[in-house]
Amino acid sequence: MLNHIPNYDPRMSQRVVYSHEVSNEDAIRHLPDNVRVTLERLKWLSLSLPTQTLYKYCRAEHARGLLKEGAVRIGTFSYYRAQEKHDPLRGDGREATALFHDAPLGQQDEASLSPLTLDWFRPPADANIRLNQFQTHITVSDSFVFCTSLELSRSAAGDYDSCVAINDVPRFILALTHGLCRATGVDVMQGEALLAPITYMERELSAAYHGYINPAFLKEPRFSREQEARIVWRAPEPIGHSFADFCEPSLTQYVTSASIPV
């Protein structure tokens, strides 16, 4: 069930802990010198995608900047939460959050505790416990995020007028990570990162999804037209930036212009 979504541990100060670690030796071997990293430092990178090409929708001037100079903006979850009032089409005030709850009393065995509840309580074996409902609200610690789409379509583009195709996803991510480290001074290579598709569900979820749904990759169904896949970098230290604008010239090797279907 939803096994492409990484597990997380809600007891770690409510912070997501990515569990998948996959290295890509071929991607390293062909990196340009200015982006090359050792295999050991790439162990944090996990790819989980059903396609070889991703699409970045944007304004025409931003597409030109990425294609010619490798110019990008990478925001954080807090940045995109704050965008809802300015851009309700894409901003999401509940970005990277979820509410998990047990079934109300009478819909489950009242003498037992669900795995969700047991994550927080370890009652004695002879304890007699009745819970009407137990809820836990998860907010992912602030992380850098870069959003793309799995689909080349007018629907996924929304009101954007331009699209850039990312044709070599592993090398693009490595070059992007290099530029992010240089621009922010935050060594995200020492943290965790994951690229995965978004799961479109309501944010209030049954305890049955606990451990299978990572709020960093959860969005409400009203956003489903985007068919999003995102790269999330969780830094090993607090992030002092709401977003980062920078140029990483090596990105231009891995992207081409794409025409949005009418």
Image (tube, helix red, strand yellow):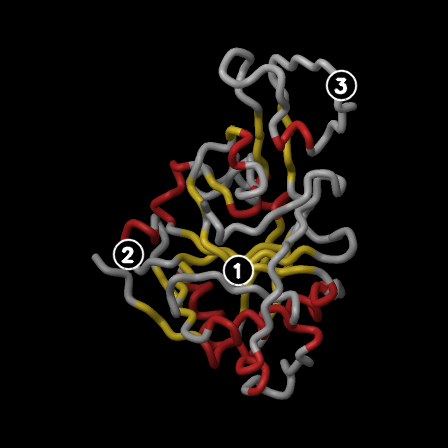
- Up-down relation of residue 32 to residue 131 (above or below): below
Q: Residue furthest front?
A: 126
Looking at the rendered structure, the kind of residue marked 1 is: Leu
Q: Which residue is mark 3?
A: 126
Instruction: Using a 10 Å C-alpha cutoff, classify the residue at mark 3 as few (fewer than 14 neighbours), some (14 to 19) or many (20 or more).
Output: few
Label 2 secondary element: loop
Rendering coords of residue 142 (x, y %)? 68, 47
Find the distance from the CA under tag 3 to the CA under tag 2. Answer: 58 Å
Q: Nearer the viewer, mark 3 or mark 2?
A: 3
List x then y, in percent, for residue 90: 45, 43
Give the residue displayed 29% in from the left and 49% down from the top: 155
**What residue is disc 1 on?**
195
Q: Between disc 3 and disc 2, whose residue precedes?
A: 3
Asked if residue 154 lies left or right of residue 194, the reply is: left
Tag 1 near tag 2, CB within 8 Å? no
Residue drawn at x 70%, y 63% is: 188
Q: Amino acid at mark 3?
A: Asp
Q: CB atoms at circles 3 and 2 under 8 Å apart?
A: no
Tell me residue 237's x, y (percent): 78, 55
Determine the residue positioned at 51% across, 32% down.
203
| Amino acid under disc 2 | Ser
Q: Secondary structure at mark 1?
A: strand
Q: Which residue is mark 2?
A: 153
Q: Where, by quadrant of the figure, is residue 233 drawn?
A: bottom right
Q: Secondary structure at mark 3?
A: loop
Mark 1 and mark 2 lie on one chain; the one further toward the N terminus is 2
Q: From what the image shows, is residue 106 above or below residue 10?
A: above
How far across and down, in percent of the image, does residue 196 sit?
49, 56
Q: CA distance from mark 1 to mark 2?
A: 21 Å
